[in-house]
């Protein structure tokens, strides 16, 4: 591997909030990462004022009373979030972004680009406006279009969602990274090294060998192809371990043998067995011989994982193209 390792930590972390417990959990995690990195925090709230119909109130009333009240509440929300950050000695900027003719996701991605943020942290289920889910399709659009890594944080159950994460909670100690030797998987691993290096975490390297993914027409006996795939898998793991050593992050390896199962199932199974507290995924790779690994599999992990998932774009490819192919 000749790809350079990223610089330690982050410069600026963008975190959209909406007042929900899950968004609060994302905020706490963003504050923690910013504190460890010495990064600035940019806290934004998307105000979709066009969602509120004016039929129930005269236009003048809406303009002079309703909209200013919404803006005031939004300003108070981001101000309170900034105070939480400053209580942890993290410098925080705030902004209220108003939707007019664009989606919330477009505003978030645009703000990340113009503000120079190098990480986006999203709570994956919250609310926007009155009661609309914010981090559903909007989160997916951010993942598709953002040019920087996106950390998706979700609450696995209602009980967890009701209890915001403390800013003093442990950092990511066990970071699981699926690898397959592709440039995109290496991009994910480099980002994992950055995150694990912030708090003395270790990395679990996972390579999935699916013997049933051999294309039809390949004239190699089962035993031979299985041996070749296992050998190639061990080489991928050794190469990834070397990169971890270069980044001075401890790593352990796992070769997972599957017979036609989904890669996402193997990732989630290993995450549970290893007690991972973060999964880092490069969004396109390969499985078996020339088979794509992380399209629909990445989306499946995102939807089903009970721990945060950090999604990292591979080089030279638009993220929206990748997830569109997985649909």
Image (spheres, grey):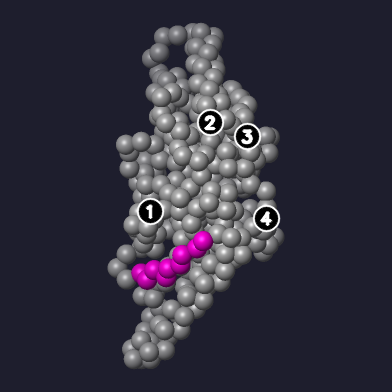
Task: Residue 69: give x, y in percent of width and height.
Answer: 46, 84
- For label 1, the residue is 116
What's the CA distance linking mark 4 and mark 2? 25 Å
The front one of 184 and 95 is: 95
Mark 4 lies on residue: 168
**Residue drawn at point x = 57 percent, y = 57 percent:** 31
Q: Which badge, 1 or 4, is on the more N-terminal residue?
A: 1
- The structure residue drawn at horizontal position 37% and vertical position 84%, both measured from the top left corner, is 54
The answer to whether residue 160 is left or right of residue 30 is: right
Q: Secondary structure at mark 3?
A: strand
Dot 4: element:
loop
- Viewer-closest of 291 and 143: 143
Which residue corresponds to mark 2? Answer: 247
Magenta span covers which residues? 91-99
Bin the neighbour count of mark 2 within 10 Å (Cα to Cα): few under 14, some 14-19, many 20 and up. some
Give the alpha-carbon distance from disc 4 to disc 3, as whole Å: 19 Å
Residue at image point 49% right, 78% down: 73
Above or below 34: residue 6: above
> How far separated are the C-alphas under marks 1 and 3?
28 Å
What residue does disc 3 label?
A: 202
SS class, disc 1 = loop
Residue 91, position as x, y percentages in the image: 51, 61
Mark before the other along the chain sequence, 1 or 3: 1
Point out the tag, 4 or 2, that comes first from the N-terminus: 4
Q: Nearer the viewer, mark 3 or mark 2?
A: 2
* Magenta-colored stretch includes residue 96: yes
């Amino acid at each position: 591997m000749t790809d350079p390792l990223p610089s330690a930590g982050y410069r600026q972390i963008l975190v959209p909030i909406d007042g929900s417990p899950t968004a609060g959990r994302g905020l706490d995690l963003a504050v923690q990462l910013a504190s460890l990195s010495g990064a600035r925090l940019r806290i934004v709230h998307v105000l979709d004022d066009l969602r509120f119909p004016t039929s129930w109130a005269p236009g003048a009333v809406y303009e002079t009373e309703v909209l200013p009240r919404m803006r005031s509440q939004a300003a108070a929300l981001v101000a309170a979030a900034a105070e939480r950050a400053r209580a942890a000695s993290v410098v925080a900027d705030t902004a209220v972004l108003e939707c007019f003719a664009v989606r919330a996701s477009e505003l978030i991605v645009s703000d990340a680009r113009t503000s120079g943020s190098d990480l986006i942290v999203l709570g994956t289920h919250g609310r926007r406006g009155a009661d609309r889910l914010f981090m559903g399709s909007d989160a997916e659009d951010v993942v598709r279009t953002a040019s920087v890594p996106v950390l998706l944080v979700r609450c696995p159950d209602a009980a967890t969602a009701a209890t915001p994460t403390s800013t003093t909670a442990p950092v990511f100690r066990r970071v699981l990274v699926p690898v397959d030797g592709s440039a995109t998987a290496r991009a994910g691993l480099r980002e994992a090294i950055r995150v694990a290096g912030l708090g003395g975490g270790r990395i679990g390297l996972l390579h999935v060998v699916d013997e049933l993914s051999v294309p039809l027409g390949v004239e190699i006996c089962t035993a031979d192809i299985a041996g070749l795939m296992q050998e190639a898998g061990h080489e991928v793991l050794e190469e990834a371990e070397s990169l971890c050593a270069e980044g001075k992050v401890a790593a352990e390896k796992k070769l997972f043998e599957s017979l036609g199962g989904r890669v996402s199932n193997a990732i989630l199974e290993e995450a549970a067995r290893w007690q991972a507290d973060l999964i880092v995924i490069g969004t396109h790779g390969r499985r078996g011989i020339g088979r794509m690994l992380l399209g629909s599999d990445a989306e499946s992990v995102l939807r089903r994982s009970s721990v945060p998932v950090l999604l990292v774009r591979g080089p030279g490819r638009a993220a929206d193209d990748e997830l569109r192919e997985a649909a």
